Image (spheres, rainbow, N blue to C red):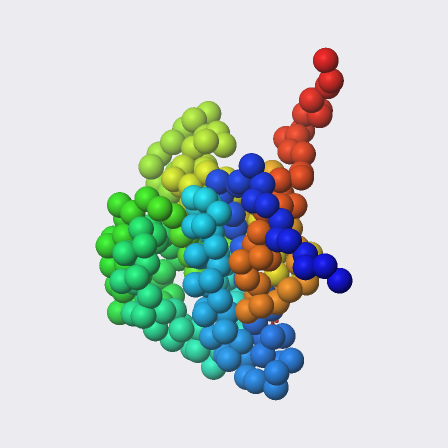
Amino acid sequence: MTDAKPPALPERIPAHVAIIMDGNGRWAKARGLPRLAGHRAGVDNLRRVLEAAVEFGIRHLTIYAFSTENWARPPDEVRGLLNILDEVIDRELAQLHKNGVCLRHIGRLERLDPALQEKVQQAVALTRDNTKLVLNIAWNYGGRDEIVHALQQILRQGYAPEAVDEALIARHLFTAGSPDPDLVVRTSGELRTSNFLIWQAAYAEWYVTPTLWPDFGRDDLLAALVEFGRRERRFGGVPDAPG
Ligand code: IPE
Ligand code: IPE
Ligand code: MG
């Protein structure tokens, strides 16, 4: 057997990659560990994937960390996930800031305890002028909830119905300021959106891999980019006609 050479980085790199980090529970179960051990492994993995994203020149990365539906999980698991968020900010913020990462939160903070809300807001404020990579953390995020929130804002601001168009709605989404994702990656093989970026990903390319999130590394991200490089994006048009 010859050593397989890693594929070259494609010329066309998506400006915005969004990842549904799924499969932590199955990763833990396969090792006879509690689900929270899977979530911890998932967070550790995030550092690897972030480094790879910077290496590959991705400018916007959105990660799905906790959905509006994930409150339905057992209270211990929810509490554990909240603790992990808290710890991760304490542990990683200084380095993220040093590395030029601009942190943003998408979703609602309301259900978090006030101290944690404050911590998230401070992290966002500290890193707001960083330009190396925008990292949108989707926490207590749901695509439907985001659209409801946007509509509430628009109505409150008194827009006339004729003034409502797609651009106005997009400007009121939590992701305002990031381009629409070009590529959505879902780990662990599920073929569904699970309420992630349902507006913004209308024309994203999808890449689903059976690899569980804690095992998804640099080369897996590279494989997703290579596949993206092969896709023909048509946006409802027709392929370029020869001649
Ligand atoms: C994704 O992993 C992390 C969160 C949803 C918080 P899961 O916890 O959904 O893992 P599986 O799908 O049960 O394997
Ligand atoms: C989606 O994964 C949410 C996150 C990764 C945070 P889930 O594991 O919650 O999705 P379903 O329930 O399988 O659709
Ligand atoms: Mg899951």
Examine the rendering and report whether any part of residue 2 can be seen: yes
Q: Quadrant of residue 116?
A: bottom left
Percent position of residue 240, x then y? 69, 22
Judge by depth and name the residue closer to the eye, 203 or 243: 243
* Residue ID at (61%, 83%): 31
In the foreground, 40 or 138: 40
Q: Residue at x 50, y 62 (%)?
A: 67
Image quadrant of residue 84? Answer: bottom left
Residue closest to the far bottom: 32
Task: Report how many numbered discs are placed on residues in the image.
Answer: 0
Observer-nearest of 208 and 105? 208
The residue under the point 71% across, 25% down is 239
Residue farthest along the top direction in this orientation: 243
In screen coordinates, is 203 left or right of 60?
right
Q: Is residue 150 visible?
A: no
Where 167 falls versus 106 (above or below)?
Answer: above
Where is the N terminus found, in terms of image quarters? bottom right
- Please determine whether, in this image, residue 145 is positioned above or below residue 232: below
Percent x, y of residue 58: 46, 45
Q: Position of residue 32 (x, y in %)?
A: 61, 86
Q: Looking at the image, which residue sits at the far right?
A: 1
160 above or below 23? above
Residue at figure coordinates x 35%, y 46% from the top left = 132
Where residue 217 sits: x, y (%)? 55, 62
Quadrant where the C terminus sits is: top right
